[in-house]
Amino acid sequence: MKGKVALLSFLATAVTVGGVYATWTFAENESTAASTTVNVAMTGVSSDTKKGTLNVMVMTENGFTLAVDDANNDHIADIKKTGVVTVTFTPSASASQDVKTNGIDVQCVISYAPYASGADTLEEWAYDGKQIFDIVNDESAPILLSKSAATYDPSTTTFTWTIDAADIGIELENEFLIDTLAKYNAMNEELGKGHFVLTVSEYTAP
């Protein structure tokens, strides 16, 4: 793996949305139903490399979103992934002609990072004593973006890849029954203790 990296942080938040995800609904005592979705918001940053600049973009019209929702209306947590992650590479003026013409191969690695009060490891990021998420695309199995798969725009001299939501390797590790508002709030609190980092860098075959 060469070059500097671009980081994509996944921040856990709770927001109310409509029409996109199935929602968690609870009726307790005489209170009205509560309807909400736990989303993960992401931001991308760029990093200069010797050969050019890598960018990760998610805050676009079809940007990637990750949520824990109640897709089957059975109060069992499901993971919902939509949109795309966009990766771009723009060669620098001093890059070789081969790089300017053909681009570079890129890899994307997903890792876990805690907040100050969060769990130190992914395994410890848990609800009800059980690990919440599993990372498929860690360092041992990165998402590979070959130069031949990139779309080239000569007007900006930029190579672009898109990663579909289904190909982002973040999954639920265990089954969680969230059948009360209290349980929902407890899981939502745990989700806010950590986040994911997507590291994008040049890939060199071993």
Image: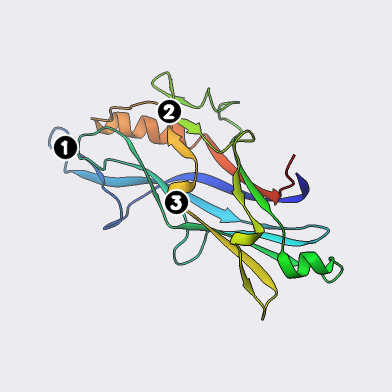
Residue 96 lies left or right of residue 68; in this view the side is right
Please name whichever residue, 51 or 27, is drawn nearer the observer in this view of the structure.
51
User: Which image quadrant is residue 175 in?
Assistant: top left
Residue type at mark 3?
Answer: Ala
Q: Which badge, 3 or 2, is on the more N-terminal residue?
A: 3
Q: Which label lies toward us, 3 or 1?
A: 3
Q: The N terminus lies in which quarter of the figure?
A: top right
Q: Which mark is residue 165?
A: 3
Residue 122: image location, x then y, percent: 55, 28
| Residue that numbered label 2 is attached to | 173
10 Å crowding of disc 2: few (<14), some (14-19), many (20+) = some
Q: Residue at x 61, y 41 (%)?
A: 142
Furthest toward the left, the residue is 30
Q: CA distance from mark 2 to mark 1?
A: 28 Å
Q: Residue at x 59, y 26 (%)?
A: 121
Picture layout, residue 167 above or below residue 99 = above
Q: Secondary structure at mark 2?
A: loop
Q: CA distance from mark 3 to mark 2?
A: 18 Å
Expressed as whole percent of the image width and height from the top left, the position of residue 71 reads: 26, 43
Of 193 and 164, nearer the camera is: 164
Mark 3 vs 2: CB contact within 8 A = no
Cα distance between the residues tagged 3 and 1? 32 Å
Name the residue furthest bottom: 155
For disc 3, the neighbor class at 10 Å (few under 14, some 14 to 19, many from 20) is some
Mark 1, residue position = 27
**Placement of 75 over or under 67, stated as above or below:** above
Q: Sequence-wise, which precedes: disc 2 or disc 1?
A: 1
The amino acid on which the numbered mark 2 sits, given as a three-letter code, is Glu
**Horizontal side of residue 87 vs 103, given as left or right:** left
Sequence-first disc among 3 and 1: 1
Tell whether 202 sits left or right of 184: right
